[in-house]
Amino acid sequence: MRLFDYTASANCLKVRILAAQLGLDLERVPIDIFAAETLTDDYLARNPAGETPVLELDSGAHLAESNAILLYLAEGSPLLPDDLEERAQVWRWLFFEQSAVVPSIGSARFWILTGRDAGREDELDRRLGSVRSVLSLLDEHLCGNAYLVAGRYTLADLAVYGYTHVAPDAGIDLDDFPQVRRWLAAVEAQPGFVNDLVTYPENARPGAGASIYG
């Protein structure tokens, strides 16, 4: 299998962590989003949304959306519970990650690190407010739970970790969320854990490259 991968994306990082923890042999194909490499006809045939990551299966089919890839790769592993109720709770957190964590933490971090916040201070403040709401929800849940689901490390923790751990890049002090900080450390202590996320390169700044993000 091949993973079309952008090293500065925490959505891609999630797949790299899972592959390392499960010992999967994925051939990584580096993609530079801001060099218009996701806008080519060849790439859009793999994922019409022009996003990373994309997993090329052994069959030659392509699977987009990071959490769909996680679910596919984790099938049959201890990271995806057999019990339907517990599995449904994993799905719940994967949906939450894409609907709440990424649009708040991910977008605020992206804006700040690439200079897209200039002149958009009111909108950035709104997004940072959403970041704090998301972290407060997580902190409250983790007050009575060592992990997000079933009292143990699952795919839910891996997925939510992706963008949650970079909240400080958006200027958020995780000391205000002690349970989140504790949980992040527990995720990072898992066997096989890796974190090779890099910061955004210069061509990610406004006007410096070409991508679906402008």
Image (cartoon, rainbow, N blue to C red):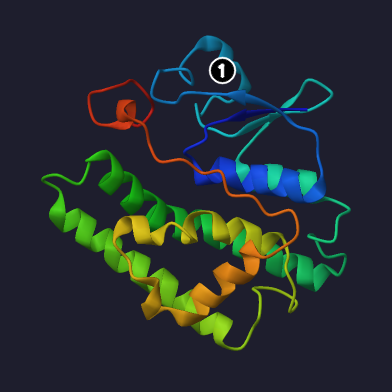
Please indicate whether residue 189 sits to the left or right of residue 200 in the image: right
Image position of 12 with respect to 208: above or below: below
Residue lying at the far left in this picture: please name it. 119
Between 65 and 32, which is closer to the camera in this rendering?
32
Image position of 205 with respect to 195: above or below: above
- Residue 214 visible in the shown view: no
Badge count: 1
Image position of 208 with respect to 156: above or below: above
Q: Position of residue 72 (x, y in %)?
A: 77, 44
Please indicate whether residue 64 sits to the left or right of residue 31 in the image: right
Q: Quadrant of the C terminus?
A: top left
What residue is shown at x 66% (from left), y 43% (from top)?
Answer: 15
What residue is shown at x 62% (from left), y 62% (from top)?
Answer: 188
Residue under label 1, please give it: 43
Between 174 and 44, which is closer to the camera in this rendering?
174
Please indicate whether residue 110 sits to the left or right of residue 195 in the image: left
Mark 1 Cα within 10 Å, few/some/many (few <14, many 20+)?
A: some
- The local secondary structure at tag 1 comes to helix
Q: Name the amino acid type tagged 1.
A: Tyr
Image position of 207 with respect to 160: above or below: above
Q: Position of residue 77 (x, y in %)?
A: 86, 55
Residue 58 quadrant: top right
- Residue 209 visible in the shown view: yes
Q: Quadrant of the N terminus?
A: top right
What residue is shown at x 52% (from left), y 35% (from top)?
Answer: 7
Please indicate whether residue 9 sits to the left or right of residue 27 in the image: left
Residue 196 quadrant: top right
What residue is shown at x 48% (from left), y 60% (from top)?
Answer: 165
Q: Position of residue 40 (x, y in %)?
A: 49, 12
Residue lying at the far top in this picture: please name it. 41
